[in-house]
Amino acid sequence: MALPPTVAVAANALAERLEAGETDEALIVELAELGQIRQKDLNDHRANGAVFTPYSIAEELVREVGINVEDSVCDPSVGPGVFLLAAAEHKYRQGEKVPSIIKNLRGIDIDPVTIEVARTTLQLWAFWRGQEWLPVDQLVVGDALLDMPVDWYGHCDVVIGNPPFLGQLKSETARDSIRAETLKERFGSCYTAYLDESMLFLLLGVELSSENGRVALILPASLLGSNSSRLAREWIDQRLPLKDLWVGGRSVFEVAAVEVVAPILRERQSRNCRVVSHESRKTIEIPAVADGQWSRLLAALNGTPVVNLDGGEVLSDQASVTADFRDAYYWLAERVMESDGEDLRPKLATVGLIDPFRFMHGQVQTRFAKQKFDRPVIEIERDPPPKLSKWLDKKLVPKLLVATQTRIVECYADSNGGLLPSTPLLSVIPAKETQLWHLMAAIASPGASAWLACIAAGTGLSQTTIRIRASMLANLPLPLPSENWDEGAYLARKIQEETPGEQIYIRFGEVMNQAYNAPSDALLAWWLERLQKKQP
Ligand SMILES: C[S@@+](CC[C@H](N)C(=O)[O-])C[C@H]1O[C@@H](n2cnc3c(N)ncnc32)[C@H](O)[C@@H]1O
């Protein structure tokens, strides 16, 4: 396979300069640039997830993972080879000979043209550093998840790279049914329908890893806490546990603004995990996590207090917790209109209208079904279709509405049952109506916010927001019955129904911390700071 013309021109020019004896240290940047030239040629990077890594990021990860001179290094989605280039340079600086370095580099990619860019880049590097044109044999074309050379399994000391991010909720990156079946067979119980393909590469990395091997792959931060990747994280933790976490943030890739992290897997020598932020350079050490609870590391970096909410029951023991389905959205979209003042029709509730203890209907505009509304209400015909009618019976009851993309839990009690929630709002319908304010107090408590932030860090649109799923909220531990919880319920109602001063919020936080047996000033301060940002 030939090089793409744009890369060939740049590579030939580099080769001539090298053969003329140029030895400038800045050449490394120009070598890495060949990959970026290839990137510009790719019209649509989405289908194969081909977003190449800047050289400085590859260098940083190579340092984080720690590469010894004799290590075999494999990038299972090698692209133009930037990680192998950084690994080669790292070894060279440690005194390793160029032929030995080249011999220990391995890479596979599905794109035969990009593989040639990797080969040329590494050959130019070898000539630059070793004055010899060497073959780079261990670069192969293939689907890493299905056609990996068998003798690489268990024989890679370092698996490093940036696999394709192929989210399954978008049609352009979703796999077809044949691939889904094949991958399901290949990855067994770790496979789930919505699992991003990049997580399958992390599973592959563990399989490739040698006895003392290490794996570091860049992934979307949402995989730290998403439900679809939970089984994969648990499987990994039992084989090659998460030791450290590199947090890249949102600015790593120019063409794709996604929050990224790189889990670093290796046998743990200490009981602590390191979490390193690329953007702030902050590094923390926290006790290691187990059972795939990786989002706790990101939560700790964000300063989320650690809480242990040991109670008796969980929310789903006392309430149903549901997210609405698409049909409900369309029913509402066909019937939504602007209210003309005093109105008995059900009000529409959207995530944008729910703030902590507040429903902002009439105070802020909201968007729904591609339109803006000041006071959206729902006009329901006399005989609605049976399915809608059933849904209305279920929803027009006293309930709690919980927003889903937040920094702390934002919950409002619809005590009259006059609101209709639109997806993605969550509805919590108490089994006993009398428990409404108690459940509100538990969900709106500082402890619940910290608990959810720990299990879901990375799943929101930014590093510090969380996406609350119904299944997560359903598992929220409840406090044991106590006077503190009773007072919390009373105060939650007071906060919602009056406009109290700050002291009431503080008291609410304190009593709910007591109710949860988590009397922590740090937790209270963390929650109040976030709450204040939501106050009008
Ligand atoms: C995000 S890019 C990263 C490339 C390189 N590791 C880097 O960091 O610059 C992902 C690469 O994976 C390749 N790819 C996509 N699906 C693949 C698969 N199933 N097996 C191997 N490579 C794949 C794409 O062609 C692309 O080169």
Image (tube, helix red, strand yellow):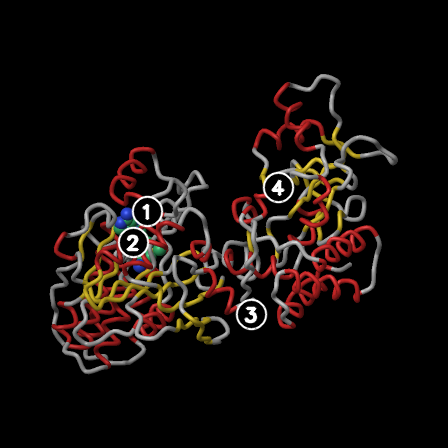
Check if mark 1's residue and mark 2's residue have beta carbons within 8 Å: yes
Q: Which of marks 2 and 4 is nearer the N terminus?
A: 2
Residue linked to disc 2: 203
Mark 1 to mark 2 CA distance (whole Å): 9 Å
Visible in this render: residue 344? Answer: yes
Mark in the foreground, 3 or 4: 4
The residues bearing labels 1 and 3 have C-alpha atoms spaced at a distance of: 31 Å
Q: Tell me which label, 1 or 4, sits earlier in the chain.
A: 1
Tell which tag, 1 or 4, sits nearer the viewer: 4
The span from disc 2 to disc 4 (Cα, nearest Å) is 37 Å
Q: Name the residue under label 3.
A: 303
Q: In which quarter of the image is residue 446?
A: bottom right
User: Looking at the image, which residue sits at the far right?
Assistant: 342
Q: In this view, does 131 lie to the left or right of 315?
A: left
Q: Could you say which disc has been placed on residue 319 in the image?
A: 4
Q: Nearer the viewer, residue 290 or 207?
A: 290
* Amino acid type indicated by mark 4: Ala
Q: Determine crowd level at label 3: few under 14, some 14-19, many 20+ residues with C-alpha closer than 10 A.
A: few
Q: Is residue 41 above or below residue 82?
A: above
| Ligand 1 within 8 Å of the CB at mark 3 | no
* Secondary structure found at label 2: helix
Residue identified by numbered label 1: 190
Mark 1 lies on a secondary structure that is helix
